[in-house]
Amino acid sequence: MTEMTGTPIAHAPGFIANETPRIVSARFDYEDSHTLERYEATDGYHALKKALQQTPEEVHNEVRDATLLGRGGAGFPAGVKWGFCPPGVWPRYLVVNGDESEPGTYKDRLLMELDPHQLIEGCLIACYAVGLSQCFLYIRGEMAVAQERVAQALNDAYEAGYVGKNILGSEFSVDIVLHWGAGAYVVGEETALIESLEGNRGMPRLKPPYFPASIGLYGQPTIVNNVETLANLPWIIQHGAAAFTAIGTESSPGTRMVAVSGHVKRPGVYEIVNGTTTFRDLLYGNDMCGGIRDDNQLKAFVPGGGSAPWFTPDQLDLPFEASQVGPQGSMLGSGAIMVMDETTDIPAAALTLTKFYAHESCGKCVPCREGGTWLEQILRRVVTGRGTQRDLDLLIEVGETICPGDFPHAAVPSKGIEAVPFPYRMTTICFVGPSAFAPVHSALTLFREEFEAKVAGNEARTMIEVAVDV
Amino acid sequence: MTFFTDDNLALAEEIIGRYPKPRSAMIPLLHLAQEQEGWVTDEAMTQIGELVGTTSAEVLGTCSFYEMFKRHPVGKYVINICTTMSCALMGAGELMEHAESRLGVRAGSTTSDGLFTLEGAECQAACTEAPCLQVNYRHQYRVTTDQFDELLDELASSDHAVPDHGVLSQIRQHIPKDRSVGAVPPEEVKAAPVWLSEDGDS
Ligand SMILES: Cc1cc2nc3c(=O)[nH]c(=O)nc-3n(C[C@H](O)[C@H](O)[C@H](O)COP(=O)(O)O)c2cc1C
Ligand code: SF4
């Protein structure tokens, strides 16, 4: 790689080590963590060797026993998903989801830039266990440095005999092909990822029937896994499922990488114990974010990436455990927390997310394509002081065309508002449509007074006035 | 129709060969075209269509879906300022205002000297380092207005390592012939891979 002078091209900063066990970030402290030399010097490719001495079925069972929950957003156990490939249908493929673009999410890029061999070893283990004959490693287009690091790592791994034909002298052979996206958030959705990999516009497919494990790339059984999910595999094979489940809780074992951004003292990416760590530990712990900036009050936080309904200080003691967060009205999603302190203009903050999802709609479903745009325009009107009382109702009415019925939200004990649990109903193919509504709905439900203040005194306008000035 | 240089054509064919179906190489080839020219020309799309076995209209269909593919010339340096939540909370709005006034263009436009294109962008997976921006898809973290000015000065000089717009990874994947398994069209694969047990299933 060209050495830089002048303008630094810094490699993925932001990781902050703490006392938790380090499963996927173990090598991050080394300056040369991305090199094959460092990887081999720190147990690298030992898990692959160990796996090759077992049957594929034994390796699969180990992963199933580890209850490794997918880290891409849906939290589905990897070992179970692998078992969904229909028997006797060949070939099967692996598609690695390195498209990381959910607002607030920052961990897969770190894992690709700082420890690409760990990811490669994870891919190999998955391919061996499930009989996947080719792997496509799809990296987001806007990540030039991650692309460079993974390309170099793949070149070195091929050269050293870890990837390709007859790996380490065994019968196991698999190519890993590096592929980049070109800028489209929705392509992170697994069926859109497959469309994109087939050379098409990245529009999601309807599930059912298009569950990738049964009908995926080229219509073949395809496993789509997130980068962090796969990065856990070498450790699990090396140390065993029992060591993995000894960390965290039974239903959410191991660790997970969580990015905390916004108004905290030490924003950063933390590897935390799954299942037991609470939002309070993370936001206020001295070994973690250390509290809110300037010792301000916490106003709200988005607990699981931009798509997630918001929480307030009332939910701080919830742990990173889907079965507890869901009933309280949100989700853990992609491990991304965005923190808003007391100075935050809530409607304006919601707009930064709604405009994101409106912009990223692929256009396939009318409620998302039209509804997202409407939500953005109405909200923008409100935020800029041109909205009316009617607009506040309209926001909910438009949202209900995307998600009919009660939309999940957190409880607000001081206002007598009870939580509405996850999940929601939806009229769209994928979650982009509902995600445009989630921030609007949360902000309006939890902080209605801020919206009222923005529209106070504004007279209702005629349709023509509205039409010429949205 | 020839658009690609001989070297890039050879590279394009190598890339196509990695996929079970040629059309899968569409996005990589569009990137290659953009690397060669700085943007995606009609000639490039026609040749890509020929290479992967489809029409140029189909290529345009794919190309136009993805934000990174430019259908007109852009600046040598495309500056993307993130405007999504984490960066917005940490001052992206002020940074954008500063950038617009310093460059004398609105987001979405190119400076008259052809050096800079300024864009408002969505989340760049660097949320803890807000506000952030990218120059030709290389990150700059926690950018102050002063640092933005310094960055422009550096980019305008030659003392930096940011390649021209269109160049992404400066390291290419290389699969050595003797190590490559090779891509096989899916319809030609009938049996389980050899490393699975005899009965062919796990
Ligand atoms: C709109 C949308 C965007 C998504 N973006 C990503 C992404 O960038 N990375 C990712 O791993 N998963 C993303 N997902 C989740 C994937 O569809 C899929 O569930 C995941 O990649 C499966 O991997 P896992 O089981 O290892 O988590 C997204 C889902 C949706 C609906
Ligand atoms: S919900 Fe939106 S992004 Fe998802 S498939 Fe429908 S239109 Fe496309």
Image (cartoon, coloured by chain):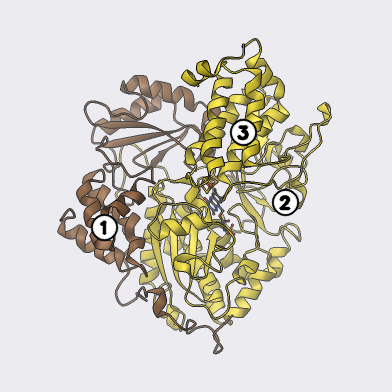
Chain colours: A yellow, B brown
Q: Is residue A299 visible?
A: yes
Q: Name the foreground residue: B146 vs B61.
A: B61
Q: In this view, does B181 lie to the left or right of A112?
A: left
Please say if A116 is above or below A143.
below
Eye-nearest disc, 1 or 3: 3
Give residue B50's quadrant in the image: bottom left
| Residue A208 drawn at (x, y percent) | 59, 61
Give residue B17's quadrant in the image: bottom left
Q: What residue sits right under mark 3 in the picture?
A: A398
State the count of labels: 3
Q: Which of marks 2 and 3 is nearer the N terminus?
A: 2
How far apart marks 1 and 2 lie (CA) works out to 46 Å
Q: Label 3 amino acid?
A: Val
Q: In this view, does A3 lie to the left or right of B92?
A: left
Eye-nearest disc, 2 or 3: 3
Q: Which mark is residue B49?
A: 1
Q: Which chain carries label 2?
A: A
Dot 1 alpha-carbon crowd within 10 angstroms: few under 14, some 14 to 19, many 20 or more = many
Q: Which mark is residue A322?
A: 2
Q: Name the foreground residue: B137 vs A394.
A: A394
How far apart marks 1 and 3 lie (CA) works out to 41 Å
Eye-nearest disc, 1 or 2: 1
Q: Label 2 amino acid?
A: Ala
**Residues at discs 1 and 3 in contact (Cβ within 8 Å):** no
